[in-house]
Amino acid sequence: MKKRLISVIPALAAILTLVSCSPAAPSSSASPAGQPSGSSQQPPAEQANYQPVTFHVMIRGTADTFGVPRTAEIQAKTVKDRWNIDLKYEMVDKNTYNEKVTAKFAAADFPSILYYGDAKVIQNAIDSKVFVPVTKAVMSPEYDNVDRQLYFIRWYQNGEYYGFNYHSGAPETINLRGDWLKNLNMEVPKNPEELKEVIAAMTNNDPDQNGKNDTYGLTMQGDLGMTGQFWSMFLPAPRIIPTKGAGLYIDSKDNTVKTILDDVPNMEKALAWFNSLYQEGILDPMYVTLKQQDVEAKFVSNQSGVWVKEIGGLPSRLAQIQNNVPDAEIVAMPPVETVSGVTNYDLVAFKSDCYFMTKDAPDVERGYELLKYLYGKEGIYAEAYGEEGVEYSLQGGAFQWLNEEARERSNPARVISSYLDLQLLDPIPVVENAFQAIQAMASWIRILPLTPQQQSPTTS
Amino acid sequence: MLEGVTQIIVGEKPVDYYQQVLQEAKDIGLDSIVSDVNQVFQKG
């Protein structure tokens, strides 16, 4: 039944775009996500007689997560050598990304490939043939061990895959400042009542021991985005937000779509919990004005102690906190079993966000290869660690950084969140702890085995 | 929906005001959305 539930959630997500599309998907490989078959051995570009083409790739991020000049350099060299592609990144701050994309679309100035997540815009782009199918990339042998029905179904329409998803096996969890818990002599909470006690203590009991009343246990977005993990502690569906998507979910008991809005008793329990936080002054009263980036800024600058984030995003945020608080820790709250027996967490693979190729891509065949490289094993390792022999070595099978700058620049988030069976080369305690915390999820849904190991990736 | 939920969270309205929020959602077609999605889902 759990597998059934997992398999239909993406279909529901597709339905919720409220556009016509075929919910039927091709048969999944259905096998556990395993090691990809490795990159295909491509002849040098000159041998293949490729004419040079330029691919413009538009991605979003923030200044501190754009530490990719070196990554771009490695990737650019690789794709030039293999496919005679000149790779040009356009990196746009995430706070202005949607605005930038809108402007480009209005001007019919399409990048070759872009990362995007607005469902309505994506659907329009598919309908108007601005986005072209990437089915050939998705169906390539490298992905035979990937559950396509789970990870690529979101933008499967009319027999074609349009979105090239790159993530994720890592759920978004409720995370807490572990060092604050230690200062408060408190344990990681396991239920809503304990979480409220922690939020209160992190507000009232000087958790950072700076002698000032300058922290809140919890802050959140005014539009209630990224709060589903809290709501779902009381409601019969994982990671659900009542104010988004009509609160629809699939009830596995009778296999029908329902809305949590109709569950008045449990909705009122959830509302009472949030209201009690607000009334007791332990929920940041400014929350109604806050956006996603504001909530993150408060967490990484020691103003709040609880934050929802995908596990893969934790190491970089912990590093930011540790710039000012070297002993800072982040710990994940274990999943809470809901009234219907599911968890308040789920995978994030069902989001709209994917990479899309546009009709202005200069060569779709090489575009497929580019997608598979950039967001496959090799591209992910290049982004995470750099180049073997330059940034790190694997002599004797033992991983070693070759310079401190490379270690500081490393970005393992993609490794952690990939659906590919990739191993972390350099163990990360905050990630290990988070995965330990959510092991209970394994009985409800599948999570990928991401225990860090000192193993060499297959780089060929 | 967001406005009503926010009013409850910040205490401008009591928790049982939710039933009015729900009714307003139904008035603008919530039940039809659930029904329509169910039809598509069951066919899928």
Image: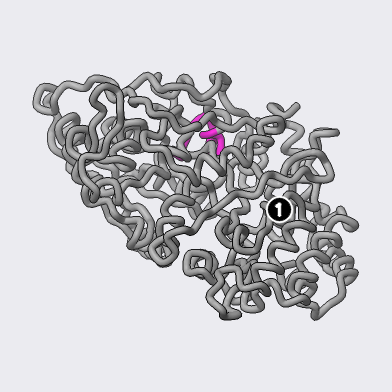
Q: Which residue is mark 1?
A: A189
Residue B14: image x %, image y %? 87, 75
> Mark 1, chain letter?
A
Q: In the rendered view of the protein, which quadrant contains the C terminus of chain A?
A: top left
Residue A246: image x %, image y %? 73, 55
Q: Is B30 left or right of A264, judged from the image as shown?
A: left
Residue at the extreme left of the image, as rendered: A46
Residue A161: tell me if it is visible: yes
Secondary structure of the residue carrying numbered label 1? loop
Residue A190 in the image: above or below residue A211? above
- Of the pair A77 and A294, the residue shown nearer to us: A294
Residue A249: image x %, image y %? 74, 45
**In the figure, residue A91 lies in which quadrant?**
bottom left
Q: In the rendered view of the protein, which quadrant contains the N terminus of chain A?
A: top right
Residue A46 in the image: above or below residue A336? above
**In the figure, residue A401 lies in which quadrant?**
top left
Residue A414: image x %, image y %? 41, 42
Residue B34 in the image: above or below residue A215? above
**In the figure, residue A36 lies in which quadrant?**
top left
Residue occupying the point 63% across, 40% down:
A438
Q: Is A355 left or right of A150, judged from the image as shown?
A: left
Three-letter code, disc 1: Pro
- Of the pair A166 and A281, the residue shown nearer to us: A281
Query: What's the magenta region?
Result: A151-166
Residue occupying the point 13% across, 37% down:
A52
Check residue B16 for magenta coloring.
no
Residue occupying the point 79% across, 48% down:
B34
Residue A179 in the image: above or below residue A393? below
Check residue A158 for magenta coloring.
yes
Residue A106: tell me if it is visible: no
